[in-house]
Amino acid sequence: MRSIPPDDVFRSLADPTRRAILERLIREGELTVRAITDESGVSQPMVSKHLAVLKGAGLVRDRREGREAHYAAQARGLAPLVNWLEHYRAFWSARFDRLDDLLKRMDP
Amino acid sequence: MNQAATTDTRTVTIEREFTHPPEKVWRAISQPELMAEWLMKNDFKPVVGHRFNFRADPVPGWNGVTGCQVLIVDAPRKLSYSWADSGGDAVNGVKTVVTFTLTPTKGGTLLRMEQSGFRAGPDDRFYQGAQYGWQKMLAAMENVLSRS
């Protein structure tokens, strides 16, 4: 699988309408273009354009069913944005709690 | 610390004092079956150059395996190994070095864990993103990442 640079991901999220669309897909799961358009406040061609950008950044995937395109958020596309520093800070802090428990249980 | 490393990469540091002697803390961080109890399952050996893995439960995009190699064994003072995510997302994963330093204190042991070598780029972007009020969305996304 090709890796998408964080720049592309961030650029695709710079637009508030696109962020709103992605947030909705994350919240509600897979939706048709029509359903997305209904609550977006912009025209269907604009929605399709936004979805294409999100797809290019690897943040959504689409599938056709009959005449309708269905879109869903793609969690993997967010990997470049994962804050590894925060992730590992929380990880080690929790592991140190467990280490403390273990030390209490161990033979002296 | 190496100057070049501090400009190009970031380090996570966790420090805690435990009310147990260094020798005991050393056992907990260097005996595989004890490491498994607080850290992760592993095939660690306290031998410089030894390659080993930590194994967590797999999640989508990551097979749960962390690839490591022992760099420093200085009982009961310092233990260091490389730490790299492997699997499908290795390209977005981390290539870091984990170093434990044990310092005797009056009441026990000060244990310092430094994980160094995080690339600065994506994390800087993350903090820039925060000013647009993205934290909430990113939190939601990471939530999706961890369970999907």
Image (cartoon, coloured by chain):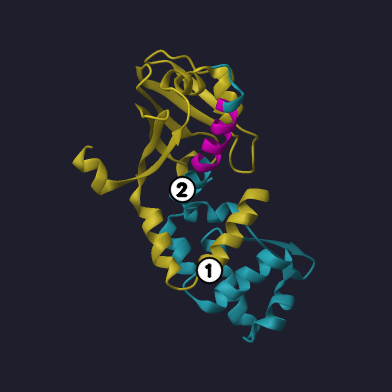
Chain colours: A cyan, B yellow
Position of residue B148 relative to residue B110, above or below, is: below
Question: Where are the magenta residues, as a range?
Answer: A92-103
Residue A55 position by quadrant: bottom right
Q: Quarter of the image holding residue A98?
A: top right
Q: Which residue is mark 1?
A: A53
Q: How many marks?
A: 2
Q: Which residue is mark 2?
A: A84
Query: Considering depth in this image, is B145 or B30 the residue closer to the camera?
Result: B30
Local SS, label 1: helix
Subunit of label 2? A
Q: Are marks 2 and 1 in contact (CB under 8 Å)?
A: no
Lower position in the chain sequence, tag 2 or tag 1: 1
Where disc 2 sits, the SS reads helix
Please name the amino acid that badge 1 sits on. Val
| Res. B90 visible in picture | yes
Which of B56/A51 is in front? B56
Tag 1, which chain? A
Residue at 57% across, 21% down: B34
Q: Is residue A34 magenta?
A: no
